[in-house]
Image: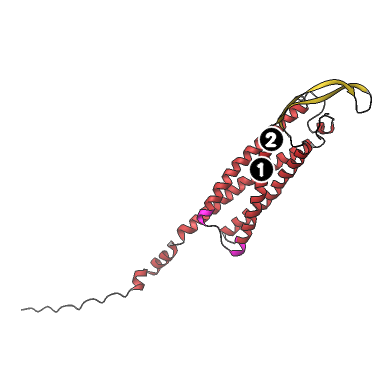
């Protein structure tokens, strides 16, 4: 198995895994957005307030509920969702393309390989930024929900605690933590794709440089050049006899 074929197989596997990881980002983010009625929980700020209202058991008493002062910017959730959608679409297209190249036993051109490297590096930085934003936004929302860890439950346990909001919070931590882990996985896969794309570019460049030189090296080893074989060698003029007096 040649080097380019191994690289194509590895790149195809990376694209397949990126499709799965991208779906694990898009689906939880879509479910979270639906549960929060289009609002973004990331970087949301609020505080806890105790009021005299009827408890879930039906008895009146002091009930603590969460008051959200400001919901997070929608771009924080949309950015992570965009990276996931792009990863799914790009991974599916490039995976099919890699399979086509494997069947046809050829690879990208030198220019196309360079564009693939450039795009992979750009999306690597985008996915890394989206992962950082999602992680910091989830930490900020958890600080708001747990009142900076002053509540007797963790952020994961708070999704089973009534927050008395007008949104569904029964699975927010599961959805956002799954999207966070998957997005970091997408970032790692984009790093792997960037490395593989660079190796394919290097291999294409090596083939492009060494390809025209191989016939010339073969001719030098055989001891003749194309000019020698293409045109006959002109005969030497006959020697003029010398007359001595």
| Front residue of this view, candidates 34 and 201 | 34
Q: CA distance from mark 2 to mark 1?
A: 12 Å
Question: Which mark's residue is nearer the viewer, 2 or 1?
Answer: 2
Check disc 1 and report its element: helix, strand or loop.
Answer: helix
Eyeballing the image, is 155 above or below 221?
Answer: above
Q: Is residue 110 magenta?
A: yes
Q: Indicate the position of residue 176 as horizontal and vertical percent values.
A: 74, 38
Asked if residue 12 shows in the view, the reply is: no
Residue in the image at 63% along x and 41% along y: 127
Q: In the rendered image, which residue does mark 2 sit on?
A: 74
Asked if residue 190 shows in the view, the reply is: yes
Q: Indicate the position of residue 149 as horizontal and vertical percent values.
A: 77, 25
Q: Is residue 86 left or right of residue 204?
A: right
Callout 2 crowding tier (Cα within 10 Å): few <14, some 14–19, many ≥20:
some
Q: Is residue 213 left or right of residue 13?
A: left
Check disc 2 and report its element: helix, strand or loop.
Answer: helix
| Front residue of this view, candidates 195 and 114 | 114
Residue in the image at 34% along x and 69% along y: 227
Residue in the image at 65% along x and 47% along y: 87
Specify which label sits upstream in the sequence, 2 or 1: 2
Callout 1 crowding tier (Cα within 10 Å): few <14, some 14–19, many ≥20:
some
Eyeballing the image, is 66 above or below 222?
Answer: above
In the picture as drawn, the residue positioned furthest to the left comes out as 245
Instruction: Report the quarter where the C terminus lies.
Output: bottom left
Q: Is residue 159 left or right of residue 95?
A: right
Q: Is residue 118 magenta?
A: no
The magenta segment is 101-112
The label number, if any, that marks residue 82 in the structure image: 1
Q: Indicate the position of residue 35 as horizontal and vertical percent values.
A: 79, 38
Q: Indicate the position of residue 228 as horizontal and vertical percent values.
A: 34, 71
């Amino acid at each position: 198995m040649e080097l380019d074929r191994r690289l194509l197989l590895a790149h195809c596997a990376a694209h397949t895994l990126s499709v799965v990881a991208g779906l694990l980002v898009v689906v939880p983010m879509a479910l979270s957005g639906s549960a929060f009625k289009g609002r973004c929980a990331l970087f949301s700020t609020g505080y806890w307030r105790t009021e005299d209202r009827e408890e879930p058991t039906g008895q009146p008493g002091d009930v603590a509920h969460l008051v959200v002062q400001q919901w997070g910017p929608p771009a924080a959730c949309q950015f992570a969702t965009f990276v996931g959608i792009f990863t799914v679409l790009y991974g599916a297209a490039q995976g099919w393309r890699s399979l086509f190249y494997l069947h046809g036993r050829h690879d990208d051109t030198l220019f196309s390989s360079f564009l693939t490297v450039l795009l992979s590096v750009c999306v690597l930085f985008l996915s890394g930024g989206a992962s950082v934003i999602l992680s910091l936004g989830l930490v900020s929302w958890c600080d708001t929900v747990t009142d900076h860890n002053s509540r007797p439950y963790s952020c994961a346990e708070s999704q089973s605690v009534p927050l008395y909001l007008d949104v569904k919070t029964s699975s927010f931590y599961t959805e956002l933590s799954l999207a966070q882990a998957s997005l970091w996985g997408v970032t790692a896969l984009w790093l792997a794709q960037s490395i593989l794309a660079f190796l394919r570019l290097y291999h294409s460049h090596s083939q492009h440089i060494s390809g025209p030189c191989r016939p010339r090296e073969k001719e030098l080893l055989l001891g003749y050049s194309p000019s020698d074989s293409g045109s006959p060698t002109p005969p030497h003029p006959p020697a003029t006899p010398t007359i001595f007096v």
